[in-house]
Amino acid sequence: MNALGRHIIAEIYGCDAEILNDREKIEKIMVDAALMAGAEVREVAFHKFSPLGVSGVVVISESHLTIHTWPELGYAAVDVFTCGDHINPWDACNYMTEKFGATHITATEVKRGLFDQPVQVKVSSL
Amino acid sequence: MNALGRHIIAEIYGCDAEILNDREKIEKIMVDAALMAGAEVREVAFHKFSPLGVSGVVVISESHLTIHTWPELGYAAVDVFTCGDHINPWDACNYMTEKFGATHITATEVKRGLFDQPVQVKVSSL
């Protein structure tokens, strides 16, 4: 079976609360994580919640990265979904974990779109 | 244990290929799915790929909805992630499945952010 995508569901704990509440820092870390993994960034949208928390998404040609943070718990819910063979989603995930100063992480990789035929990869955007 | 969020990972098959390749239709279905479930839409970003496929995200106050489509396979990879008790992510998921004309779906709900203390919900955005 061929998978169209790889999706990492990451529960990241013990993060730096200040970073998790800083929209600009989170956005930079997420974009850098995408670029560092070799992804092509298409769209970036982040929100700061009051009094605490940041949510955001980085849409990449190869799928997406998302985050939702609870600074008061030192916790971030992160997803990294990539298609194609030239990107390793764990590179982005590990980069974020390090930048958030996390003490531990629980992560699972889910294969998305399992087909018995050769897979196609979307790479060009209109 | 209390979960901060509920995350549905949906593999949607046998969808209408024309809908899956129509950026505007997909965007409307996703936004309607979010609103119909009672979510507050914050940000919308969609891309059409050449020759086939659409990727997009709807950022909601309660987390996000994402989609990546392969019209040639009739397949859509959908995620619905919601926080708080006032939204049922399955409402949004089922709405999309119906609108895509899907013949079958494989979906799993993952609890995100499990803590033994009472959970907090981010509802107001700056």
Image: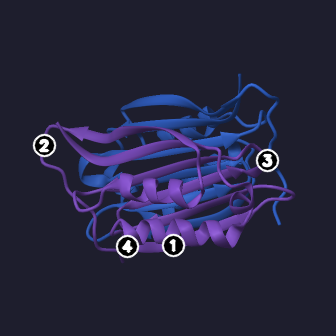
Chain colours: A purple, B blue
Report which quarter residue B120 is drawn in.
Answer: top right
Q: Earlier in the sequence, mark 3 or mark 1?
A: 1
Q: Quadrant of residue B21?
A: bottom left
Distance of mark 1 from mark 4, alpha carbons?
10 Å
Which numbered dot is residue A72? 3
Residue A78 in picture, x, y percent from top left? 54, 49
Which quadrant: the N terminus of chain A?
top left
**Which is nearer the N-term, disc 3 or disc 2?**
3
Between tags 3 and 2, which lies in front?
3
Q: Give the letter of the chain under mark 4.
A: A
Observer-side mark, 1 or 4, equals 4
Name the one closer to the observer, B18 or A37: A37
Q: On what subunit does the disc labeled 3 rest?
A: A
> Which is nearer the N-term, disc 2 or disc 4?
4
> How many residues crowd mark 2 within 10 Å: few (<14), some (14–19), many (20+)?
few
- Residue B53 x/y as whole percent: 33, 61
Three-letter amino acid code of the residue under disc 2: Gln
Which residue is identified by label 4? A40
Taking the spot 59% from the left edge, 49% from the top edge, the residue there is A102
Can you name the residue that lies furthest to the top here?
Answer: B1
Q: Which mark is residue A117?
A: 2
Amino acid at pointer 4: Glu
Please tell me how crowded label 1 is: few (under 14), some (14-19), or many (20+) other residues with Cα within 10 Å. Answer: some
Chain to which the residue tagged by mark 1 belongs: A
Q: Counting residues from the N terminus, which is met first, the one under dot 1 or under dot 2? A: 1
Name the residue located 65 percent from the left edge and 50 percent from the top edge.
A15
User: Could you say which disc has been placed on residue A43 in the image?
Assistant: 1
